[in-house]
Amino acid sequence: MSLDGTYDDGNIFAKILRGEAPAARVFEDDHVFAFMDVFPQARGHTLVIPKHSQARNLLDEEPAVLTQVILGVQRVARAVRAALKPDGLVVTQFNGATAGQTVYHLHFHIIPRWEGVELGRHAAGGMADPTELKALAAEIAAQIA
Ligand code: AMP
């Protein structure tokens, strides 16, 4: 899908928000929902999405919503840091298939990095164990300030 197009509410993140698909929930407030990526590029790979939005990407988003989303990203990234003690954190966001986007509901990736541990490939890794993801989600959730 290119940068242009209309929002499809059948996308997997919309289904997660409606409770029609499972997710290892980390955090939610009135504006954002954070959960574990099921094909993690690193241990603790977390996604943050707006709850009330029909933006497919960053360019579509309303400034007021985007403000809340990026504040949510910072809050969750701080919790990931506190829980997992990484050496670094990558925050990424893809716009359009050519850029690597595979799900067309705006989202930010928070990916912890450790010295000497290679980053997994984007959207190309294996599926994580759901029980392990739930445990990680709980560890991160416990550190939300
Ligand atoms: P992007 O390629 O930037 O659109 O990112 C989409 C991300 O969603 C990828 O990292 C996928 O691993 C992840 N993903 C796809 N389906 C699910 C799902 N059901 N639950 C959690 N993460 C998912």
Image: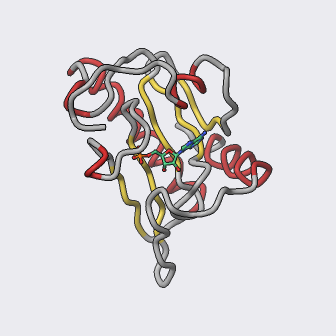
Residue farthest to the front, as pictured:
1
Q: Which one is nearer the viewer's eye here, 1 or 103?
A: 1
Q: Looking at the image, which residue is at 70% across and 32% down?
A: 22
Which image quadrant for residue 65? top left
Q: Which one is nearer the viewer's eye here, 127 or 81?
A: 127
14 sits to left or right of 65: right
Which quadrant, please, contains the N terminus?
Answer: top left
Q: What x and y, as percent, mark residue 76? A: 48, 42
Q: Looking at the image, which residue is at 56% across and 48% down?
A: 37
| Number of marks present in the image shown | 0
Q: Looking at the image, which residue is at 66% across and 45% down?
A: 137
Q: Looking at the image, which residue is at 30% across and 20% down?
A: 6
Residue farthest to the right, as pictured:
131
Which image quadrant for residue 18? top right
Residue 78, compared with residue 119, is above or below; it is above
Q: What x and y, as percent, mark residue 53? A: 37, 17
Q: What x and y, as percent, mark residue 86? A: 50, 67
Residue 79, compared with residue 43, is above or below; it is above
Q: How did the renderer colour the structure?
A: secondary structure
Q: Which one is nearer the viewer's eye here, 35 or 16?
A: 16
